[in-house]
Image (spheres, rainbow, N blue to C red):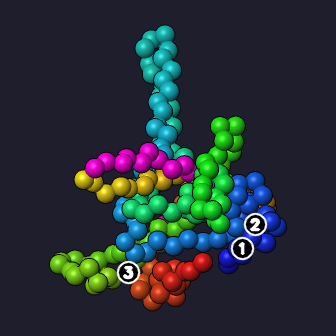
Amino acid sequence: MQIWGPLAGALDFGQSARHGGEGLKVLSFFSDELISVTMPKDVKDREEIDLESAKGTIKRMIIGATYLGMSPLITINQKNYELVEMVQGGKLDRLAGTYNPPKPNESEHPTFWYEIFSAIYGDGSHNMGNVGGYERILLRNAIGIEGDTPIDTKAWTTYPIQTTCTGYTDENGVTFTAWEEQTLTLEQFDALRVNRISA
């Protein structure tokens, strides 16, 4: 559900009082704006703890590797100040069209969630439109910041958004993991209508 506009922002929907914005808003990138998403996982490596006796006998405890979260990098080819404000805060003046990033003393970032949908194809050769389904990845609790933007001659400018996603505990004490994966049929994907979100 989206609740957005100047009044929604004034009523503090979507963390607007602290981080700016116009309320609780959902943005959708399903055409040519999105270039790529890389999804490195944050992993704490396994540990080996050894205890050696006087005779050289070794007792070893192995603590397995664990997931701490995920740090996706989203790259788009069009500057979107609403997305930048949603990810890192700052102040976007929608009337003047100006954006000011967070001040150095504003180290707290807004939190947000997002979903990534990638097409699934069957075996063999396929046309781009012959999609068999979609993989859905829900990232429940994210913070982020805009990455470095190169401005080169004879090159298209790209805009990276660096995010960090972790698990969280809700108000009822229920713990959630950093992400959730799901395979969707075409019918399930179409029922979500995520490629027709407008705001």
Closest to the observer: 145 or 176?
145
Q: For the N terminus, which image quadrant?
A: bottom right
Can residue 66 be seen here? The reply is yes
Please tell me how crowded label 3 is: few (under 14), some (14-19), or many (20+) other residues with Cα within 10 Å.
some
Separation (CA) of disc 3 from disc 1: 35 Å
Q: Amino acid at mark 3?
A: Gly
Can residue 86 be seen here? The reply is no
Separation (CA) of disc 1 from disc 2: 6 Å
Vertical relation: 150 (above or below) 22: above
* Range shown magenta: 136-153
Q: Position of residue 71 (x, y in %)?
A: 49, 50
Q: Position of residue 49 (x, y in %)?
A: 50, 27
Q: Amino acid at mark 1?
A: Gly
Q: Residue 15 lies in what quarter of the image?
A: bottom right
The residue beneath circle 3 is: 133
Q: Secondary structure at mark 3?
A: strand
Q: Residue 9 — which label? A: 2
Q: Nearer the viewer, mark 2 or mark 3?
A: 2
